[in-house]
Amino acid sequence: MTRPANILLVEDQRIDIELTLAAFRQARLGNTVRIATSGEEALDYLYREGKYEDRKEYPLPDLILLDLNMPGINGFEVLKRIRNTPEVNRIPVIILTASKEEGDRTLAYDLGTNNYLVKPVTSESLLRTINHTEQFWIVLNVRDAI
């Protein structure tokens, strides 16, 4: 990718948002990280609804980091809708969740996640996870044009 990536972080917990953004800053990644604090907001962003209708201001993400356990529309439903919408179904979706449940992991892969990551406990391990995720999914991965 020749330009900085646009990443959509879908996370309802303020502390997890801050930790993830701090990891991106600490890793000195030049990507733009946009935040959706609910499944509803993520879908509005992806489907250009409400305040997100201007695609120049809110471009489609190159990567989505998606939490599973959110009130309202949860991460599973967001993932299902993404995979059933031709305009956005090829965007890589990485589940970033606290859930270690095998059933959650299986369902996420059945619904089409590209990767399932359990949120690291320490800031150092989160930094490593962010670095590895960015390196593979943004730098190395060759994708279809969206």
Image (tube, rainbow, N blue to C red):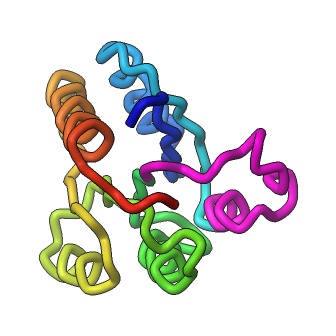
Q: Is residue 59 magenta?
A: yes
- Relative to 130, is 97 above or below? below
Q: Give the quarter of the figure containing the N terminus.
A: top left
Question: On the picture, is 53 further left or further right than 76?
Answer: right
Which residues are drawn in magenta? 40-63
Question: On the picture, is 139 further left or further right than 89?
Answer: left
Q: Residue at x 47, y 29 (%)?
A: 4
Q: Residue at x 51, y 86 (%)?
A: 84
Q: 68 and 86: which one is in front?
A: 86
Q: Residue 53: which quarter of the image?
A: bottom right
Q: Residue at x 48, y 29 (%)?
A: 3
Where residue 136 sits: x, y (%)? Answer: 20, 42
- Relative to 8, is 70 above or below? below
Where residue 49 sits: x, y (%)? Answer: 81, 64
Q: 81 and 70: which one is in front?
A: 81
Q: Residue at x 22, y 61 (%)?
A: 115
- Relative to 126, is 79 above or below? below
